[in-house]
Image: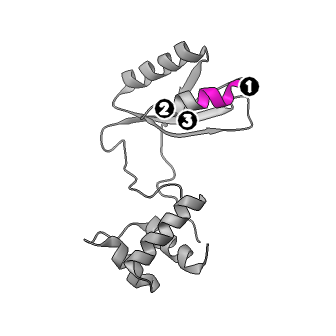
Amino acid sequence: MDDRDRAILQILQEGIPLVSKPFEEVAQRVGLTEVEVRERLAALQKSGHLRRLGANFDSRRLGFVTTLCGAEVPAHRLEEVARLVSKYDQVTHCYSRRHRFNLWFTLVCRDWQEVEKILTEIFHQTGIKVYHFPASRTFKLKATFKL
């Protein structure tokens, strides 16, 4: 990753320009062509430096419910359970932590009944109880990083 890649990512993480040709706008700001910007983004994705390029929506304002979920999974089953959990479209993040609750994921669902249905399905498929922790207050609204 070079300085131009960092400049492109800095612009995009602050918000994709809302114009008819956003990558052309980014290209002009960093001194490249639109094709070069797209090629660089593809290379960053392929190398793993860029995981996802897309919009972030405020799911609560759109009428969805969100909750953080945690489970205590035997180490030898962690990959298996994580793969199963990650298959749900409602799961936005899934990761392990060094903690008694070693598998964590976030659910975004239409309502609390859908949350309970998914957690029940996971329990029936794995035998592992998943706890969920709905947020009562949001403190961090945006995360951007100086590149």
Residue tagged by mark 2? 87
Residue 44 appears in view: yes
Residue occupying the point 67% across, 29% down: 78
Q: Residue 68: in sight, yes or no? A: no
Q: Are marks 2 and 1 in contact (CB under 8 Å)?
A: no
Q: Looking at this view, name the residue that lies furthest to the bottom.
A: 31
Q: Is residue 60 left or right of residue 92?
A: left
Q: Secondary structure at mark 1?
A: helix
Q: Label 3 sits on what residue type?
A: Phe
Which is nearer the N-term, disc 2 or disc 1? Answer: 1
Q: Which residue is mark 1?
A: 76
Image x and y of residue 81, in percent: 61, 26
Question: Which residue is at a point 47% across and 65% down the rendered structure image?
Answer: 13
Which range of residues does the magenta coloring cover?
76-82
Q: Which mark is residue 44?
A: none
Residue corresponding to mark 3: 105
Q: At which x and y percent is residue 141?
A: 46, 54
Looking at the picture, which amino acid does disc 1 mark? His
Residue 14's x, y, as percent?
A: 45, 67
